[in-house]
Image (tube, rainbow, N blue to C red):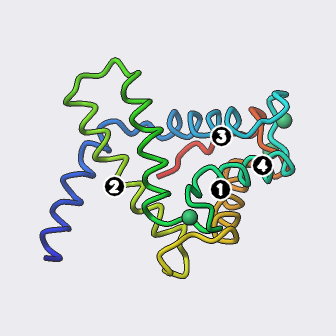
Amino acid sequence: MIRKSLILAAALAAPLSIFSAPALAASHARDTFIKEQDVNGDGVVTKEEFVITRDQLFKAIDADKNGSLSKEEYVGEFKARLEKRLAASPDTAEKKEEERVRQMRQADVRFGVLDSDKSGAITPAEFAYSGWRMFVTHDTNKDGTVSAADPIPADTN
Ligand SMILES: [Ca+2]
Ligand SMILES: [Ca+2]
Ligand SMILES: [Ca+2]
């Protein structure tokens, strides 16, 4: 069982390394972060903006409004966005399927990381904490905001 999943993990990880261009990927991640969290559109994400958008995102994912995110809600919301992105992508069906498998596997892993006490659901505190770590990761010049002025780490390996 363990061996099988290791082999599977290796097989899934292999195509990743082919496409990995760390600097590009990191830059893309930062710019996407800015685009999604920059409420007033000035190109700078402040902590206040980030708290607002994180809160909105939590509420949007919490489909049954019970104040926590189940795996179904979390992965489901991600899949809906992923499918939209894949539908708009010019890639072949085969490539899209590869991307789908990879992304859904990552979403699954992310849920496990977010659910830090392994209760099976993400609480607002857990969600806020993970968001905060994301903010800090992107704020590479440590000025308390995320913008294009934050240098992308040269090598994220
Ligand atoms: Ca802003
Ligand atoms: Ca819920
Ligand atoms: Ca910064």
From mark 2 to mark 4, how far is it between C-alphas?
Answer: 26 Å
SS at mark 4 in the image: helix
x, y percent for residue 109: 41, 63
Is residue 114 rendered to the left or right of residue 145?
left
Amino acid on which disc 4 is placed: Phe
**Can you identify the residue that label 1 sits on?**
58
Q: CA distance from mark 3 to mark 1?
A: 16 Å
Q: Position of residue 2 (x, y in %)?
A: 17, 76
Q: Furthest-front residue in view?
A: 64
User: Above or below — where is 124 with respect to 73?
Assistant: below
Crowding at dot 3, Cα within 10 Å, few <14 / some 14-19 / many 20+, comes out as: some
Q: Secondary structure at mark 2?
A: helix
Horizontal placement of 63 versus 78: left or right? right
Ranked by sequence position, the earlier of labels 4 and 1 is 4
Q: Amino acid at mark 3?
A: Phe
> Residue at label 3?
33
Mark 3 or 2, nearer chain start: 3
Secondary structure category for the residue under label 1? helix
Q: Residues within 10 Å of mark 4 (few under 14, many from 20)?
A: many
